[in-house]
Amino acid sequence: MFAEDTPWRVAWMEAISPQVVEVASRHSEGTIFTRFCPPARPSDAHGMWRGYYEKWWMMTAEHLSYEMLGLVPELARLSPPATIFDKHVYSPWMDGRLHAGLTNEAVDTLVVTGGETDVCVLATVLGGIDLGYRVIILKDAVCSGTDETHDASLELLGSRFSAQVELMLTADFLSSDPQGGL
């Protein structure tokens, strides 16, 4: 729904896709795709999300084909072994399942790619910081619908959270990690 011709299309996804695919391909067993899943209908949403989906009714599951809710084909082929984690809000941390799973696997570092930098990526990173993870953002593998908020988000995360967040280019990350582990 973010890669196709919808009101939520993010044009920059095409430009970052090769980097995301390369990282996920090299680390498919440790990759978790957090997939944003809208409710079937606005009335199924809670609180302010109901009003949000009343505005964006055309982006609810009853109006989108099932394929629109899936991963782009280049990433879908990596699962399994990559894991798909469905979430219904911006943050993947809300119900505790993701943190519990990562803790169970003794994961202490998150390498973040995807979209949108100023929404889901931001929520993922801030939650990861709060939970004590080492967070690496691959700055050429994240994108937003608008350049201004993308750039502002990276500036905020790179400067305000510099003790907890590392900004890195994909090539630098991959070359620093030749065996596939951190």
Image: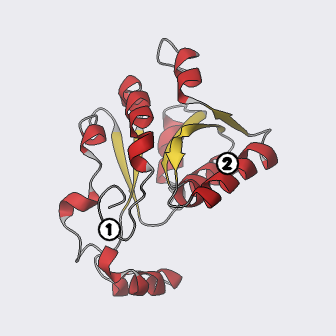
| Residue farthest along the top direction in this orientation | 179
Earlier residue among tags 1 and 2? 1
Under mark 1, the amino acid is: Thr
The location of residue 61, given as percent across then percent down, is 26, 72
Q: Secondary structure at mark 2?
A: helix
- Relative to 133, 86 lies left or right: left
Amino acid, disc 2: Leu
Q: Which mark is residue 20?
A: none
Q: Vertically, is 54 above or below 88?
A: below
Q: Which residue, given by chain and number where applicable, does mark 1 sit on?
A: 6
Q: Pointer 2: what residue?
A: 154
Label 2 crowd (10 A; few <14 / some 14-19 / many >=20): some
Q: Nearer the viewer, residue 149 or 54?
A: 149
| Residue 159 placement (x, y as % from top left) | 79, 45
Q: Dividing the image into 4 quarters, which one contains the N terminus? A: bottom left
Residues under numbered marks 1 and 2 in contact, where contact means CB atoms less than 8 Å apart = no
Q: What residue sits 51% from the left and 63% below the top?
A: 90
Residue for point 30% across, 82% down: 41
User: Horizontal and vertical percent for residue 51?
Assistant: 47, 87
Alpha-carbon span between mark 1 and mark 2: 25 Å
Q: Is residue 136 above or below residue 122?
A: above
